[in-house]
Image (tube, rainbow, N blue to C red):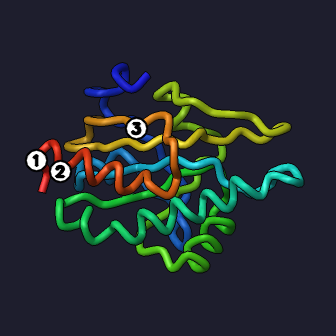
């Protein structure tokens, strides 16, 4: 799947943003290089699935902590899940995040790019995946994400090898 997506134009999808109306992901990606990490989210998850929420929080903090290094390389970070904007606002406040979390409850991005998802009961969720986007094109895909805690460091290591920044 990763090779299939490299070179593909990031589609124009309008996603919900905490504290704002909405944001067109393609327009954002054409304005700035992006690292987009997709995560399952925990809102509405069945009882006993707390691990997803814990791993989400770990991944959010990892990207928060690596944000200065990504910004020094010219990249912005956004997280995308199927969670609603209220749950994402809560996650941003609890994790003291410095990057945006975008809400895609209809999994539009997954549909347009044929990204892997999973269904918990009736709720569709993203599988963990990271996209590096430059000039509106996907240049790298990290899937599967073996460790939510190390996913940001993995992106930085790849950028270093590629001579980015």
Give residue 120's position: percent from left, percent from top. Answer: 79, 39
Q: Is residue 4 above or below residue 45?
A: above
Q: Which residue is the site of mark 3?
A: 142
Q: Reading the chain from its start, which is encountered first: label 1 or label 3? A: 3
User: The residue tagged with tag 3: helix, strand or loop?
Assistant: strand
Q: What residue do we see at 35% from left, 56% from top?
A: 153
Return the residue nearer the eye: 158 or 24.
158
The label on residue 160 is: 2
What distance separates the C-alpha of mark 2 from that of mark 1? 5 Å
34 relative to 15 in the view: left or right:
left
Going from N to C along the chain, the mark reached first, 3 or 2, is 3
**In the displayed structure image, the side of residue 105 where residue 139 appears, left or right:** left
Q: Nearer the viewer, residue 44 or 70?
A: 70
CA neighbours of label 2 inside 10 A, class few (<14), some (14 to 19), many (20+): few
Residue found at x 65% / y 47%: 105
Tags 1 and 3 touching, CB below 8 Å: no
Residue tagged 1:
163
* Residue visible at 56% across and 63% down in the picture: 58
User: Given contact means CB atoms under 8 Å apart, are the residues at marks 2 and 1 in contact?
Assistant: yes
Rounded to the nearest angstrom, the CA distance separating label 3 from label 2 is 15 Å
Image quadrant containing the C terminus: bottom left
Whole-percent x and y of residue 13? Answer: 46, 42
Look at the picture and state if 59 lies above or below 65: above
Give the structural element (helix, strand or loop) at label 2: helix
14 displayed left or right of 163 = right
What percent of the width, then of the height, locates residue 92? Answer: 55, 73
């Amino acid at each position: 799947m990763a090779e299939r997506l490299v070179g593909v134009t990031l589609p124009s999808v309008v996603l919900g943003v905490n504290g704002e109306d909405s944001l067109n992901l393609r327009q954002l990606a054409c304005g700035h290089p992006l690292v987009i990490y997709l995560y399952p989210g925990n809102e509405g998850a069945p009882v006993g699935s707390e691990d997803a929420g814990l791993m989400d929080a770990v991944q959010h903090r990892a990207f928060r902590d690596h944000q200065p290094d990504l910004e020094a390389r010219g990249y912005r970070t956004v997280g995308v899940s199927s969670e609603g904007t209220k749950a994402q606002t809560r996650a941003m406040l609890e994790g003291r995040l410095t990057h945006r979390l975008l809400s895609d409850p209809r999994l539009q991005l997954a549909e347009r790019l044929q990204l892997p998802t999973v269904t918990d009961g009736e709720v569709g969720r993203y599988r963990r995946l990271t996209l590096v986007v430059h000039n509106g094109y996907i240049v790298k895909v990290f899937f599967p994400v073996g460790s939510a805690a190390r996913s940001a460091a993995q992106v930085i290591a790849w950028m270093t090898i590629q001579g980015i920044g």
